[in-house]
């Protein structure tokens, strides 16, 4: 039986939706309830906590399995085992980036241009210090507890902060100087728990369900019928990413074709398939894709 720790905050809503779609619905009395449960024989304890603290709790063995960002695993330098990236963020399926940014009008082009004593505000002081040391920049790193972008140029000269869509940087007139880290959400385990064969099997089951949901996102199943004579025309326009299954229909005059395709593009694909001779076209949502 596994104990599980899930992130509160930016990743909370997307994480709850992911677990729900993976048939591992997280039950809580309210969204202020940080003790939760999942009706699954492999999971016996669920907590919702700050993602900053999750790598350390996993390292210390307070939980077996958790979800947090690569940014916090790097910042805390915790010794944990990653079961892989889960490709979702607060708003998109893209990673977030930890970047160094300066005001648009600042003269600096690279980190090496930063003058001695430059003041840098960040929620990632350890990562920032490691990065500055590597580039030989002597700076004052000022810890930030949020709203980091608002502190330039009057409180600090530069920041190291997260960016996902880039809108916070634009609104605050900031320009990216460098990327310190590209960070995905990850499924992470305590090392000892991962070495336990039974626990590892349970972790891998959970990983498979979560990845299955993520892999199915943005994809649909298309099914259609087509007369023998039109089959090649239909196959020619099926998107290249798909390798369609072709079966013969009873009666022998036509075929059934089915294929997983990107949802994006279905608006032009379905009419084109129809024009190529396909009929009885079905578009079916997919809950999970497990290789
Ligand atoms: N758009 C985003 N902005 C910030 N963090 C994000 C975003 N998308 C994903 N994350 C991830 O979420 C985690 C940060 O979660 P956290 O609970 O600190 O959110 P937060 O929005 O920064 O909270 P708070 O509003 O209290 O500052 C990090 O691991 C980060 O990589
Ligand atoms: O590139 P964007 O899509 O604009 O997202 C990035 C912003 O989101 C986070 O802020 P958060 O909401 O955590 O507020 P905070 O700075 O007060 O922590 C992060 O610190 C950036 O400011
Ligand atoms: Mg924040």
Image (tube, helix red, strand yellow):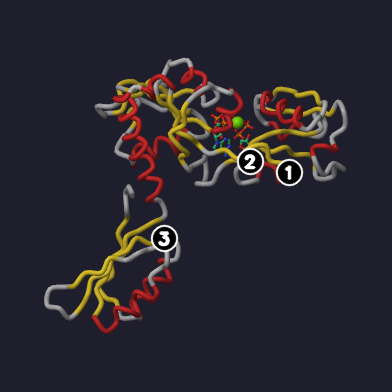
Q: Is mark 3 within 8 Å of ligand 1?
A: no
Secondary structure of the residue carrying tag 2 is strand
Q: Is mark 2 within 8 Å of ligand 2?
A: yes
Secondary structure of the residue carrying tag 1 is strand
Residue located beneath label 1 in the image: 176
Above or below — where is 81 with respect to 177?
above
Q: Position of residue 74 (x, y in %)?
A: 59, 28
Which of these two is toward me, 175 or 258?
258
Which of these two is toward me, 52 or 189?
189
Q: Position of residue 95 (x, y in %)?
A: 55, 43
Packing grade of label 3 (10 A; few <14, some 14-19, many >=20) is some
- 2 and 1 marks in contact (CB < 8 Å): yes
Residue located beneath label 2 in the image: 163
Ligand 3 is in which quadrant of the figure? top right
Figure quadrant of residue 121 = top right
Packing grade of label 2 (10 A; few <14, some 14-19, many >=20) is some
Residue located beneath label 3 in the image: 262
- 3 and 2 marks in contact (CB < 8 Å): no
Closer to the chain start, of discs 1 and 3, is 1
Residue shown at 34%/60% (left/top)? Answer: 260
């Amino acid at each position: 039986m596994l104990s599980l720790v899930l992130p509160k905050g930016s990743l909370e809503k997307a994480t709850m939706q992911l677990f729900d779609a993976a048939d591992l619905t997280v039950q809580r009395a309210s969204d202020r309830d940080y003790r939760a449960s999942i009706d699954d024989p492999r999971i016996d304890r669920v907590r919702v906590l700050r993602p900053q603290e999750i790598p350390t709790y996993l390292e210390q063995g307070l939980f077996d399995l958790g979800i947090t960002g690569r940014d916090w695993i790097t910042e805390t330098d915790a010794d944990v085992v990653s079961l892989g990236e889960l490709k979702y963020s607060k708003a998109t399926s893209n990673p977030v980036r930890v970047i160094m940014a300066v005001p648009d009008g600042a003269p600096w082009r690279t980190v090496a241009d930063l003058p001695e004593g430059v003041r840098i505000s960040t929620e990632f002081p350890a990562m920032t210090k490691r990065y500055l040391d590597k580039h030989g920049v002597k700076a004052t790193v000022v810890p930030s507890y949020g709203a980091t972008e608002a502190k330039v140029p009057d409180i600090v000269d530069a920041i190291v902060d997260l960016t996902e869509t880039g809108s916070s940087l634009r609104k605050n007139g900031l320009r990216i100087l460098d990327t310190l880290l590209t960070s995905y959400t990850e499924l992470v385990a305590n090392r000892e728990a991962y070495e336990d064969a039974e626990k590892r099997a349970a972790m891998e089951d959970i990983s498979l369900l979560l990845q299955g949901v993520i892999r199915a996102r943005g994809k649909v199943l298309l099914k259609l019928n087509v007369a023998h004579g039109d089959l090649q025309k239909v196959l020619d326009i099926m998107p290249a990413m798909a390798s369609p299954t072709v079966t013969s229909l009873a009666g022998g005059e036509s075929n059934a074709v089915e294929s997983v395709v990107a949802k994006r593009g279905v608006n032009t694909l379905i009419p084109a398939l129809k024009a190529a001779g396909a009929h009885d076209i079905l578009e079916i949502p997919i809950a999970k894709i497990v290789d």
